[in-house]
């Protein structure tokens, strides 16, 4: 009897262990009844029928990463490059991931490597090196669409490194150096061109301003000569009137003025350093005295002119007839 009781207890313990299933967070378990899928267990405590139902596959539902190993690919312009990458995916449907594909990670890896070669074979080497984001987007779209029936969501595909051959790298470096030297020469030529244009514009503006200044100076010089000529004409007229009236002091004034102007011109002459000539100082002084006398006489005449008295209204004279 005791042996039977012990056997029942042991069977009960085994039954409990077989019936109770604890699913950890981030995992999903599939349940199979006689080898056929029936349901998916989410994280938590679950009960199944022992000996009839069993746990089939245990799937990680967290985001996972697959390292894509290096491989060689031939570009559209027949350049051989070595490329590697990385892929991130998440299992959305545990049943499809467990029963639609035999080995999920290997299938995703092979599919990714094949599509990398396909995408890079349709692009030139310059496009591969300059359009990394475009390559990643195309790979993500293709791989995600291909793995969708497996209950998987590919979240990201990144190309880590693209390595052309060494001789091709050297040729690209020489090409880049030539292109930079070409751009530098073009920029230098453009700078010289702009500098020449600015210098020409400055010279043009300077010549315009100089011409404007010369025109203004000529206008003012002509105006000064006109006023000087008018003053000389007025002085000559006054001297002529004085001579006509018999005033010899005006003649002395005229002669003294010309005499002084002649001496000034001789002193300003650049051809001679020293001028020796006899001068009669008394004649010059007498001429200047004549000028002063002429001024005094003109002042006296203007002061001695009689002023006509205003007509008287109180008395009136009647002429004799």
Image (cartoon, grey):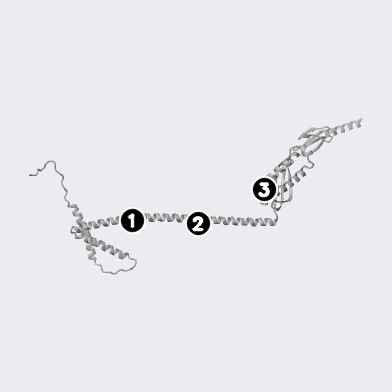
Q: Residue furthest left?
A: 321
Residue closer to the observer: 8 or 67: 67
Q: Which residue is mark 2?
A: 196
Relative to 144, does residue 297 appear above or below in the rendering? below
Quadrant of the image occupied by residue 290: bottom left
Label 1: which secondary element:
helix
Relative to 152, does residue 296 appear above or below in the rendering? below
Residue closer to the observer: 177 or 66: 177
Tell me which numbered mark, 1 or 2, is placed earlier along the sequence. 2
Does the image show residue 61?
Answer: no
Q: Position of residue 27 (x, y in %)?
A: 76, 38
Tell me which numbered mark, 3 or 2, is placed earlier along the sequence. 3
Q: Residue furthest top?
A: 1
Residue located 40% across and 55% down the image:
211
Alpha carbon distance from label 3 to label 2: 43 Å
Quarter the C terminus occupies: top left
Tell me which numbered mark, 3 or 1, is placed earlier along the sequence. 3
Labels 3, 2: front one = 2
| Total labels drawn | 3
Crowding around mark 2 (Cα neighbors within 10 Å: few <14, some 14 to 19, many 20+) is: few
Residue located 67% across and 48% down the image:
132
Q: Which residue is mark 3?
A: 132
Quadrant of the image occupied by residue 48: top right
Q: Which residue is mark 1?
A: 222
Label 3: which secondary element:
helix
Residue closer to the observer: 293 or 116: 116
Label 2: which secondary element:
helix
């Amino acid at each position: 009897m005791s042996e039977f009781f012990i056997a029942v207890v042991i069977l009960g313990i085994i039954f409990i262990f077989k019936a109770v299933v604890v699913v950890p967070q981030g995992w999903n378990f599939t349940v199979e009844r006689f080898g056929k899928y029936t349901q998916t267990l989410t994280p938590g405590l679950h009960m199944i029928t022992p000996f009839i139902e069993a746990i089939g596959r245990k799937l990680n539902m967290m985001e996972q990463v697959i390292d894509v190993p290096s491989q060689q690919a031939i570009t559209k312009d027949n350049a051989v490059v070595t490329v590697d990458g990385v892929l991130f995916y998440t299992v959305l449907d545990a049943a499809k991931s467990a029963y639609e594909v035999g080995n999920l990670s290997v299938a995703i890896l092979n599919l990714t490597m094949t599509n990398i070669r396909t995408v890079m074979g349709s692009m030139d080497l310059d496009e591969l090196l300059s359009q990394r984001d475009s390559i990643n987007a195309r790979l993500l779209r293709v791989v995600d669409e291909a793995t969708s029936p497996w209950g998987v969501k590919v979240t990201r595909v990144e190309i880590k490194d693209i390595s052309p051959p060494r001789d091709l790298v050297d040729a690209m470096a020489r090409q880049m150096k030539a292109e930079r030297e070409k751009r530098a020469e073009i920029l230098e030529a453009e700078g010289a061109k702009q500098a020449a244009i600015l210098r020409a514009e400055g010279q043009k503006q300077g010549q315009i301003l100089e011409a404007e200044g010369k025109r203004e100076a000529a206008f003012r010089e002509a105006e000064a000569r006109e006023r000087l000529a008018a003053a000389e004409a007025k002085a000559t007229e006054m001297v002529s009137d004085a001579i006509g009236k018999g005033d010899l002091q005006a003649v002395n004034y005229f002669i003294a003025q010309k005499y002084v102007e002649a001496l000034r011109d001789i002193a300003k002459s650049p051809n001679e350093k020293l001028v020796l000539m006899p001068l009669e100082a008394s004649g010059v002084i007498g001429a200047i005295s004549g000028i002063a006398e002429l001024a005094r006489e003109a002042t006296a005449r203007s002061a001695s002119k009689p002023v006509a008295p205003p007509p008287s209204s109180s008395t009136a004279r009647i002429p004799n007839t």
